[in-house]
Image (tube, rainbow, N blue to C red):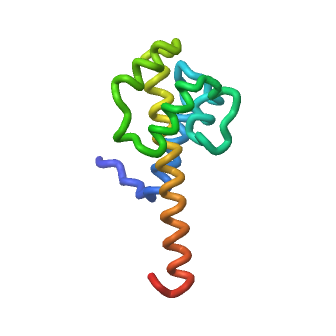
Amino acid sequence: MAKPKTKLSHAGLLATLAQQVLEGPARLGAAVRRAASRFPVGTEAAIAAPAVAGYLDKVARWAYKVTDDDVTALRAAGLSEDEIFELTVAAAIGAGVRRQEAALAAVRAAAHKGVA
């Protein structure tokens, strides 16, 4: 017998994904991944290395501009491939959540004004 499908909203799915990425098992601690997801807002001492800060900013704002040289700089700063991946995903999730929240706020505002 087929299991009934549970319909989740996009927001719910994104929240579940973010929870797993930021709090689930990983090489980097959850505090570091949470800080990476909030970069640059809420930046903590966990993101102290300039190479990491610049990389997170690039991922959050201009992911398409990330190059092999960026990853090489992080490896030279002592990060493993797994740690770089985890930072990348955390920063991307954080940026995605912020963009979704901004879009939903704009839709609500437009609906409130009777535009939508």
Residue at (52% x, 32% y) in the render: 54
Q: Is residue 107 above or below residue 79?
A: below
Q: Quadrant of the C terminus?
A: bottom left
Where's residue 48, x and y in %? 64, 25
Residue at x 50% of width, y 53% of height: 12
Relative image position of residue 107 (x, y in whole percent)? 49, 72
Say how many tags the image has.
Answer: 0
Residue lying at 53% horizontally and 44% vertically, measured from the top left: 94
Q: Position of residue 42 (x, y in %)?
A: 67, 42
What residue occupies the far left of the structure in this picture?
1
Above or below, 1 relative to 79: below
Is 106 left or right of 66, judged from the image as shown? Answer: right
Q: Is residue 105 above or below residue 43?
A: below
Q: Nearer the viewer, residue 115 or 62?
A: 62
Residue situated in front as seen by the camera: 1 or 9? 9
Q: Residue 70 occupies which quadrant of the picture? A: top left
**What residue is rendered at 69% in x and 33% in y?**
44
Q: Position of residue 91 (x, y in %)?
A: 50, 38
In front: 33, or 79? Answer: 79
Residue closest to the far bottom: 114
Q: Along the line of sight, which residue is nearer the eye, 104 or 10?
A: 104
